[in-house]
Amino acid sequence: MGIHTPADTLHRLVKQLLDSGVAESLEEAETIFNSYSLSILIRGKDAIDPNKQAALLTTIALGRRVFLGGVHVDGELDEPLLVPFALGTTLRDAVIALGGCVGQGATDAPLVIIGGEKTPKDERFSVRTVFSGWRGGIVPSHSDFELDERPVMALSPMLAAALAINEAFLYVSKDSAVAGLRPVGLSLWNPSQVERWMEDGGEPELQFLPSSLWLIGLGHLGQAYLWAIGLLPYSDPTTLQLVLQDTDVITPSTVSTSILSDEGIIGQKKTRAMAAWAETRGFKTSIIERLFDDRFKRRKEEPGIALCGVDNKMARRALEQVGFDLVIEAGLGNGYQDFRSLRLHTLPGLRKAQQIWKHNGQEKPNVSRPAYKKLLDSNVLDQCGITLLAGKAIGAPFVGAVTACLAISEVLRFLHGGSMNELIDVNLLSVENRTVVSQKKNFEEFNFGFIRIDEE
């Protein structure tokens, strides 16, 4: 397993309390996070709906990485598991496998209801997940809000779950006075549709899926991509070819942000652990264990669509130089003030990758916070170790999950004749204040390869 430094073990969301100065020691920060718990409820016919099950599993998988005091799941859990993940045969099995606790949680814990109907209003934080077509979001549980009945695009439940965890965390961290009191959502068919995101924008029923994808980076974003891809309705999953590229191993801190990592695979190469997961799902995989740069070229028979999730300017600058037809690149905020932000690019676009990610010096980490001084004074770490620790990014798994829904929807939208976006810029502190720039590049000359769902 190797020796892990504090930079490898620190929970990447707990770090937010250190960098913001809210907590004056690591022990205080961990105590605060250990006091956060979450309750989830799924009832009646929702428990036998595969889309509601997908929302439930995503809520648990994300929630247990944020609410360290426990994620408690109540409802009809002895129903057959209908989501194609290797998590057992029943919902109860899946809840336990994902790290949830079966049973009612504390009455003052925030509550996420999966689907369901309007509930009586009370003082408790309580939201319902809602989704229809390519739209997903949350509403206060007592709200009359309902979406129209449309065939559900497979990523809408994941989007709703991620927004639910974001909202619940905004509530417990007291970062928003309106958390839980408003509808919040997105249309994955038309992300620029802000005020009326809940209205049918003419989105089609899902008919086509990509036949091959190249994933660059298998941490926070890469694993969110894989979770989303795993939810897509491949009736014959062997028709999807994945290339998985990374050089790192899974550390304890990886588990805090990455939806497919758990304590049992710490120390493993990310490529091999994620290939094992993908192959269990039935997909075909190839792995590349070298840094992504401009010194190799994609072969014609390899996937032409790349999903990039690496926080490295040198790698990003090379994205247009190795022969991909289409690149969906995403980056996340990494400081205590912007960790809820995400920015997505599609390449090629009006601006070249080398223009977007210009060479410049890295910002020095702030080591002056009380928690870092205490670690230094107590000789837990030397100055080098403190600098390394302070320089690590803050990460929230629900941000990566929302990003993955947006990124993969760019590919799906193109396959269904919709327009693509060159830039999507969102901060989950206020989802409605987002920037979306339409893609002007015409990709019709490329043959991305697709599978028709009803012909697999």
Image (spheres, grey):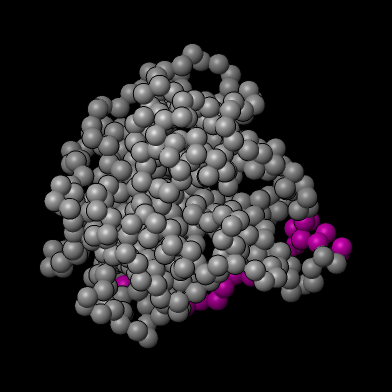
Query: Which region shows up in magenta?
Result: 352-378
Name the residue: 65% across, 65% down: 8
Name the residue: 81% across, 62% down: 375
Q: Can residue 357 be found in the magenta stretch?
A: yes
Q: Nearer the viewer, residue 425 or 108?
A: 108
Outermost residue on the bottom side: it is 295
Name the residue: 43% across, 49% down: 86
Q: Can residue 377 be found in the magenta stretch?
A: yes
Q: Position of residue 313 (x, y in %)?
A: 46, 73
Name the residue: 73% across, 71% down: 385
Say if 329 sits above or below 300 in the image. above
Q: Nearer the viewer, residue 186 or 307?
A: 307
Q: Nearer the viewer, residue 290 or 419?
A: 290
Q: Position of residue 297 (x, y in %)?
A: 30, 82
Outermost residue on the right side: it is 378
Outermost residue on the front side: it is 89
Q: Position of residue 229 (x, y in %)?
A: 34, 53
Q: Position of residue 24 (x, y in %)?
A: 78, 51
Name the image quarter holding the N terminus. Answer: bottom right
Say if 184 sits above or below 26 in the image. above
Q: Count the numbered circles shown.
A: 0
Say if 226 sits above or below 35 in the image. below
Decide if residue 411 is on the left or right side of residue 165: left
Q: Nearer the viewer, residue 119 or 143?
A: 119
Residue 436 makes an appearance in the image: no
Decide if residue 40 is on the left or right side of residue 236: right
Residue 452 makes an appearance in the image: yes
